Image (tube, coloured by chain):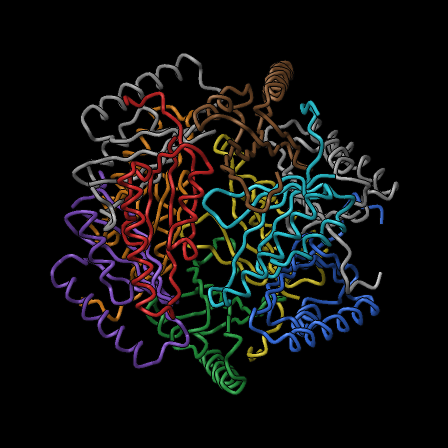
Chain colours: A brown, B cyan, C red, E purple, F orange, G green, H blue, I yellow
Amino acid sequence: MLYLVRMDVNLPHDMPATQADDIKAREKAYAQDLQRQGKWVHLYRVVGEYANYSVFDVESNDELHTLLSGLPLFPYMKIHVTPLARHPSSIR
Amino acid sequence: MLYLVRMDVNLPHDMPATQADDIKAREKAYAQDLQRQGKWVHLYRVVGEYANYSVFDVESNDELHTLLSGLPLFPYMKIHVTPLARHPSSIR
Amino acid sequence: MLYLVRMDVNLPHDMPATQADDIKAREKAYAQDLQRQGKWVHLYRVVGEYANYSVFDVESNDELHTLLSGLPLFPYMKIHVTPLARHPSSIR
Amino acid sequence: MLYLVRMDVNLPHDMPATQADDIKAREKAYAQDLQRQGKWVHLYRVVGEYANYSVFDVESNDELHTLLSGLPLFPYMKIHVTPLARHPSSIR
Amino acid sequence: MLYLVRMDVNLPHDMPATQADDIKAREKAYAQDLQRQGKWVHLYRVVGEYANYSVFDVESNDELHTLLSGLPLFPYMKIHVTPLARHPSSIR
Amino acid sequence: MLYLVRMDVNLPHDMPATQADDIKAREKAYAQDLQRQGKWVHLYRVVGEYANYSVFDVESNDELHTLLSGLPLFPYMKIHVTPLARHPSSIR
Amino acid sequence: MLYLVRMDVNLPHDMPATQADDIKAREKAYAQDLQRQGKWVHLYRVVGEYANYSVFDVESNDELHTLLSGLPLFPYMKIHVTPLARHPSSIR
Amino acid sequence: MLYLVRMDVNLPHDMPATQADDIKAREKAYAQDLQRQGKWVHLYRVVGEYANYSVFDVESNDELHTLLSGLPLFPYMKIHVTPLARHPSSIR
Amino acid sequence: MLYLVRMDVNLPHDMPATQADDIKAREKAYAQDLQRQGKWVHLYRVVGEYANYSVFDVESNDELHTLLSGLPLFPYMKIHVTPLARHPSSIR
Amino acid sequence: MLYLVRMDVNLPHDMPATQADDIKAREKAYAQDLQRQGKWVHLYRVVGEYANYSVFDVESNDELHTLLSGLPLFPYMKIHVTPLARHPSSIR
């Protein structure tokens, strides 16, 4: 089941660089692990912004919330989720 | 080069059904042809709305505008385009 | 799986009353059938507006889109869907 | 009398973890107590957000304000209330 | 129980003047009747707009919806309702 | 001459409680004094929010600005003023 | 007493030219008469839009509403009024 | 003196094709004439929309309004103007 | 050449009073000097807000930006500029 | 390939002046270098705001994101990108 997710990151300017680097490193590992599992199927950077559009493929709303709220950057992001359905003109 | 595109369709309520059906049939053929060419890489329905989120893979801004403005439903749609870049955490 | 859905109805003022009455009667039957099936679990009127907030319990995003796009009033409504998850403080 | 309430939580990033944990624990106890009393009838997590949609069943606007303004997280939330009425197509 | 209600009127430009006059006359009688009953306690014109802010004093959300949806201008208005509570600094 | 005023309060989370209490006490005294003078004719709490809708009856725009900018909470509020006129359907 | 007023004109595209011309001629005469009376003190065109920003100097909210609602273009305009006060740094 | 101008075109769906073609042909001639005069210095299509971003170089606000309000498509466009100044980091 | 300018002031709550007073005193002197020069032709307070609407009469966009960016309060203000043209119904 | 980019700068008020000056000096050098390379083709100040509208001419979405995210002011800016295409009425 697919969802489009937009994430906008806002790190506080006074966060120490080492803390920020640590969070970003954990975020990257977390994101790549979910991609390898086939749950985070697309991850695109929005040009010019510290933001991404992503597509998730999960079993349920609950699974998606668990994945998103576990993101190391979760406390510093604004997230918006749009549920997707099969489009009748899609050839897939 | 990737772009996220959202399209919201608003057909006038007084359009004759045969005209609407004809436009939709041509839209579907057009969309499937571009998908087969690999230019319209994802086509998702927004749940509960007469709208879609799509991902296009084209050579340039100009090519994307040519493809979108050629849509049979183009005069009846509100379209918003977001350019995408490679995300550093993407495993692709 | 639960979703909050807001529906705002906008019937054209020039729709003949008999046509409007027919659509509304079919909408009511459709809504009550889905309630009896346990899929449309709550249906609330927004005070002062020709609109409702509803909660649906369905198997998937696709099922929800099929149900919503089959509403007799679908061509005359603006619909917004919010996916819901279990809240950790809920006692249910 | 029913109301739909959306609550968005914004805890300051510099709040000490022990203080945040204490507020959240008290919030949970408060929420569960009101659920057991039948006043907070539904509590749903918004997928991907530190937010909830809730339905309250209370005697009056004043009672609802008293309950909401007593929430331990009240100073850190943006709350929006929508009054609900019985829908003529509801089977309840 | 008090509610603030804003109503914005949009009559179609092609409505015949006699029909518009009839609706407005019925609206006025309806509004004055509710004022005399003490349910529509304040009715103010928004300066420069075909709109009003009103305060209603009713028993319940359901009663308010019944009153508002019975307005002769209801099909031509955008209405927004804000529930009000007693303010601790009010001397009333 | 009547005006509808909406005030939304945002006290900084790091303001010492004694300072906040002092401001609120002065705000309450100020509001009650204006109510007794007949200038602040209605003061309603917005349900679920640290906000109010009020109606003022003053001689001029200048007098209203003087009263509002003198509020002890003025530096911490977002205020929006809507001028009101007599409504032709009002029975007052 | 001063007010800033923004007016945006939206004439229906199917209004006959003679009717539109008549309304515009009456609007111009009306506007110039109020300017000569000193009530409509400034009338500026917004560059690129069929809109104006104006300053009115009137006795009361009621007088302003009477003047604005009497505009021949009133049924075809969106109007927003902002009450103004003397600025402490103004040299007038 | 430079201005950024965004123009969004909305032709009524029921406008006869010959009338639309005539307006568009006149618009094109008008636009190209102003470009040759050096007044309309840039004209860009917004990808996916019937809209443009343009830069004008004119003597005054009044000249810009005269040029824009003379556009054959002016009655069918939403136009927004942003005045521009020299940027201190520009090498021009 | 005329421009409507709206300025909204947001001084940080933790700015020392002496610093704030100094900035405001310099702002006042600056504003009055420009008024005496005939460049800042109107300066109105927005009722209930720490904001003003002003009309400037300058030679060019560049001159206006130079004047506005030189305001002592410039780093603490949100400013929006609307270019104005002569209105055909103005009697001036 | 052209893009319109709007950048709004928000430097924290508590950033030391030397740090701010250093960032701005590096930003200016960076911007002028890209202008000399022909990639940052227009750079305009928005009148009255600490903001610019710019036109970039780059090979791809990815190149644009690399350039923008490398701006010394990037962590302190809100950036919005609009892809542009050739306009059929442009004489270039």
Quadrant for residue E27, please give it: bottom left
Residue at 59% across, 74% down: H15
Foreground of the two, A74 or E43: A74
Is H34 on the left or on the right of A88, as rendered?
right
| Residue F14 in picture, x, y percent from top left | 43, 24
- Establish if B64 lies above or below F88: above
Foreground of the two, C55 or F51: C55
Foreground of the two, H42 or B69: B69
- Establish if H65 lies above or below G29: above
Residue at 75% across, 61% down: H1
| Residue H60 in picture, x, y percent from top left | 71, 67
Q: Is residue I67 visible?
A: no
Residue at 22% across, 72% down: E26
Residue farthest left in this picture: E37
Q: Can residue E61 be seen in this view?
A: yes
The C terminus of chain I: image quadrant: bottom right
Residue at 67% across, 39% down: B41
- Establish if H52 lies above or below C15: above
Foreground of the two, H84 or C85: C85
- Establish if F64 lies above or below B12: above
Is F14 on the left or on the right of B32, as rendered?
left
Quadrant for residue A41, please give it: top right
| Residue H18 in picture, x, y percent from top left | 66, 77
The N terminus of chain I: image quadrant: bottom right
Is F28 on the left or on the right of B69, as rendered?
left
| Residue E29 in picture, x, y percent from top left | 18, 70
Is C59 on the left or on the right of F4, as rendered?
right
Q: Across the whole image, how many numbered discs are drawn on residues?
A: 0
